[in-house]
Image (cartoon, rainbow, N blue to C red):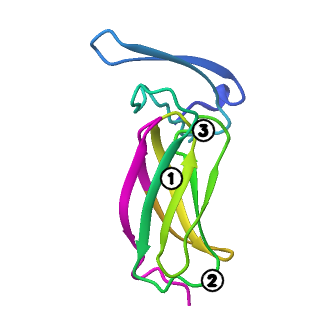
Amino acid sequence: FFAESLIRRSLEITLSDGKGATIQKDITLWGCQQRWSIQHGSLDTGGDAAWSLVSGQVSGCPVTGDWWIRAIPMFGNGTLSYEGYISPGKGSFQMAVGSGGGRYIFVIGKDRSPLKVVGIDVVGAGVNEVGTVDLSGSCPK
């Protein structure tokens, strides 16, 4: 919670972990109960690659028709989202996401409807096998 007098003002905040590591971030407050997530560090293989690959499979529903998956950086690092195709019948997917590692929000859907959201840690410049995502109870009607 922030004082109303701080609304629409830019603030510089500094966070410290007690071990000497600090991070500074400029934020603008737009509401009294605003939340602002900050990511510190990243998950990375150290390799030089333009993309990270994420692969897996969905189960628990018949995978027929137009199924899709979308990845969005959880902490807003960049403004891009990434889309992938879920293979009919098999339910498998493989998609490229940004090169930086971190936590992503994956939305799985069919046609125009999102069905399930999962958070997945993606290692940058690596191949990330997420396994099987169970959609039981989330199947479209």
On residue 97, which mark appears?
Answer: none
On residue 65, which mark appears?
Answer: 2
> Which amino acid type is marked by label 2?
Gly
Asked if labels 3 and 1 touch by Cβ distance under 8 angstroms, the answer is no
Q: Residue at x 67, y 43 (%)?
A: 80
User: Is 89 left, or right, of 80 in this rendering?
Assistant: left
User: Is 74 left, or right, of 18 in this rendering?
Assistant: right
Within the image, what quadrant is residue 109 found in? Answer: bottom right
Q: Residue at x 36, y 67 (%)?
A: 132
Q: Which residues are magenta?
A: 119-141
Q: Position of residue 107 (x, y in %)?
A: 54, 62
> Which amino acid type is marked by label 3?
Cys
Of labels 3 and 2, the one closer to you: 2
Q: Residue at x 40, y 33 (%)?
A: 43
Dot 3 or dot 2, earlier in sequence: 3
Q: Secondary structure at mark 2?
A: loop
